[in-house]
Image (cartoon, rainbow, N blue to C red):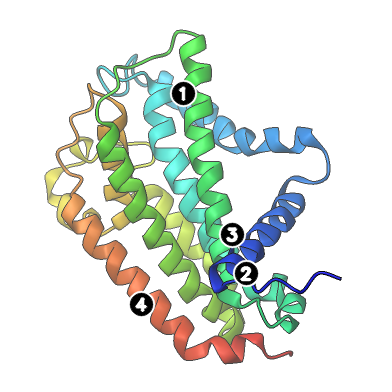
Amino acid sequence: MHPSVQRSFWQIQRDVIYALLVREMKTRFGKWRLGYAWMLLEPVIHIMVLVAVFSFLKDAFYPGVPTPLFMLGGIAPFLFFTHCFQKGLAAVESNRGLFNYRQLRPFDAVLTRVLLEFSIYLATIITLMIVFAWFGVTSPFNNFLLLVVVNIFFFCFCLGLSLALCVVGVKLPELAKLSPMLIRPLYFMSGVFFSLEQVPQEYHVYLAWNPILHVIELTREGLFKNYHGMFGSLQYLMGASISMLAFGLLCYRANWRDLVRSQ
């Protein structure tokens, strides 16, 4: 019999995350491969509805950027944020039975869910841009490095938010039920279907407090050369992301023992 191999902490953590990812993917998409195609259905429906609505108003919603691509640059980031919000609230309850294993903690469940949603978000943007290009809907690409930096900060922001929300989901389940009331107003204030330059200037000072608006503005600026996003602040997004990640880690650190207790 071979002696047992002593694994390092990082090897154990890698195996835990991998196992949780496989579990989340089976839960999210089902046992059939066709289920993976559904991750494209939600943004496509949003894009079709918005394109249909705004096509009656004007020929080009934003000059130089096709309307489907403009909407994709807002819908995909917002859906990632929304899913992280919802999955963070339910992360502990959905995985409570697994916390009997010593190697697994609520942090792993939250990190796995955010990683999966982030992968879906990136795959959605890349796949739909390729599909649109196939049908001749294109726009000159602008800045790949800006997209990388923005998405790193966006990931940190959503991870911190999900960590804080996993505590809320257990400690304040009544408040968690109000989450749809919080998300819906953000849909109309985050630039999903408009650019901040299309909004009267007196409202900029209020809308600019929203980090998701900066993510969407900077995403469109990175994706499209013809998009003149003058309102997205990388410095503000960096500060908001680091602050949210620190806040989420502190909330989790203070409450993680309570999260693993059976109810």
Residue pictured at 42% horizontal, 19% vertical: 55
> Tags 1 and 4 in contact by the CB under 8 Å rule?
no
- Which of the two residues, 26 or 192, is positioned nearer the viewer here? 26
Amino acid, disc 4? Phe
Q: Locate residue 210 relative to residue 261 in the image: left or right.
A: left
Res 60 visible: yes
Measured Cα–Cα span from mark 1 to mark 3: 24 Å
Label 2: which secondary element = helix
Res 109 visible: no
Residue receiving disc 4: 247
Percent from the top left, x then y, of residue 243? 28, 71
Q: Nearer the viewer, mark 4 or mark 2?
A: 2
Q: Crowdedness of circle 1 by 10 Å Cα count: few (<14), some, many (20+)? A: some
Label 4 or label 2, whichever comes before in sequence order: 2
Amino acid, disc 1? Met
Amino acid, disc 3? Arg
Quadrant including the N terminus: bottom right
Residue receiving disc 2: 12
Count of labels shown? 4
> Tags 4 and 2 in contact by the CB under 8 Å rule?
no
Measured Cα–Cα span from mark 4 to mark 2: 26 Å
Residue 129 image label: 1
Question: Image quadrant of residue 19?
Answer: bottom right
> Is 192 located above or below residue 53 in the figure?
below
Residue pictured at 74% horizontal, 75% vertical: 98
- Which of the two residues, 17 or 163, is positioned nearer the viewer here? 17
Label 3: which secondary element = helix
- Which of the two residues, 160 or 229, is positioned nearer the viewer here? 160
